[in-house]
Image (tube, rainbow, N blue to C red):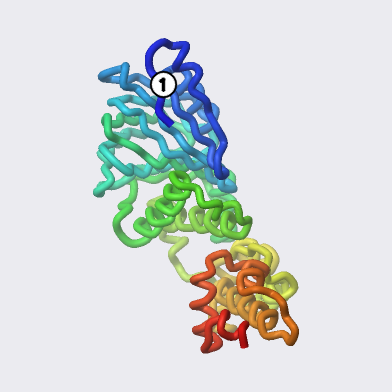
Amino acid sequence: MAVERGSPESQARVPDRQGGGTLQFRTGDVDRARTWISEVMHYPVTLNPLAETDRFALDMRGMQLGPINANTVAYGTHCLGRSSGLGVAYHINFTTSGTSIEAHRGETFVCTAAGGRLPVFEPTGAVTTEMSDDAAVLALGWDRHAVESALEEYLDHPVRPLHFPGGFDPTDGEGRTLAGLAQVLKRELGSPTGLLGHEIVAAKLADALLTTMLYATPHQYHEELAEPGPRTCPRPVKRAIDAMQADPAHPFTTRELARIAGVSPRSLQAGFQQHMETTPMTYLRTLRLERAHRDLTRPGSTDSVTEAAVRWGFTHLGRFAAAYQARYGTLPSQEHRG
């Protein structure tokens, strides 16, 4: 959809629209852009085009993914954005094209799609972002309460507000994993497939983004988080297994299973490794495969492969078929025909 230019009246008629679970907004009016960004991202901003004001054209697409607010943002011209604070979210801008110069708490970062460390903005403290005319960013905001609550579950003790000195490298180690997950979300925002309309997929991606953000960024609890979790007795492991066996299709996460088991996520992970020689999520996938196998091989079954896969939480049929073949030695379509 082309952005209308010309009189302020024509600019004001540029609509926002909903499509494929993604909220999209385009306008050439700076005031409307400022208002829209403030409403969607939940904190006040000022926008100042620094050159060729008539080329200003906000192009923004976003969605709410559980505790994560995700938006792609481009201005079409050299632009400076400022905010006195980010409300109730920890925030990362992944630069996807052009150059973005970002400043927060006395540190300045020059960010490009090719590399460079990225800052993690804290909820308090002024933020400035200067974007080149060809720049675009994927802006992710993690609800502060969700982040700190998750960290408390992993560490099994209260935590203070997080600080992230020096930023992180999105091209290496856990930072690269976080950037890869962000790319999945960016693709879904740009070309919605409806994949995130599946509750289990959306919950898994949101949980993975939150957990990976905690492991990939340089906050004051990072070293403690990286330490192996304390081992646990078989009883919490059994509680988690009972919950999964009772409802394998439920979109469980490790943190939810840990709450059910009454231990921290790290302790549950250690307990599964000690007593089951696997992880909670691998155990759950195996359980789902067994249920799908039972449905497909049941005498007189009329289920299609797709129906059986989706029923038990598999939304990517190619991966389901590969996992099924690895476990049972045949493709589900071949077994179903038999």
In depth, the one of 325 and 93 nearer the eye is 325
Q: Is residue 19 above or below residue 85?
A: below
Q: Is residue 144 visible?
A: no
Q: Is residue 116 above or below residue 297?
A: above
Q: Is residue 108 left or right of residue 192?
A: left
In depth, the one of 257 and 304 nearer the eye is 304
Q: Is residue 145 left or right of residue 297?
A: left
Which quarter of the image is occupied by the C terminus?
bottom right
**What residue is disc 1 on?**
4
Residue 48: x, y in percent?
Answer: 35, 19
Query: Helix or strand or loop: what does disc 1 sit on?
Result: loop
Residue 12: x, y in percent?
Answer: 49, 16
Q: Is residue 214 visible?
A: yes
In depth, the one of 311 and 1 nearer the eye is 1
Residue at image location 43% in from the left, 64% down from the top: 226
Which quarter of the image is occupied by the N terminus?
top left
Residue 241 in which image quadrant = bottom right
Residue at image location 59% in from the left, 79% down from the top: 286
Residue 332 in which image quadrant = bottom right
Residue 143: x, y in percent?
Answer: 55, 43
Residue at image location 59% in from the left, 85% down from the top: 335
In depth, the one of 3 and 60 nearer the eye is 3
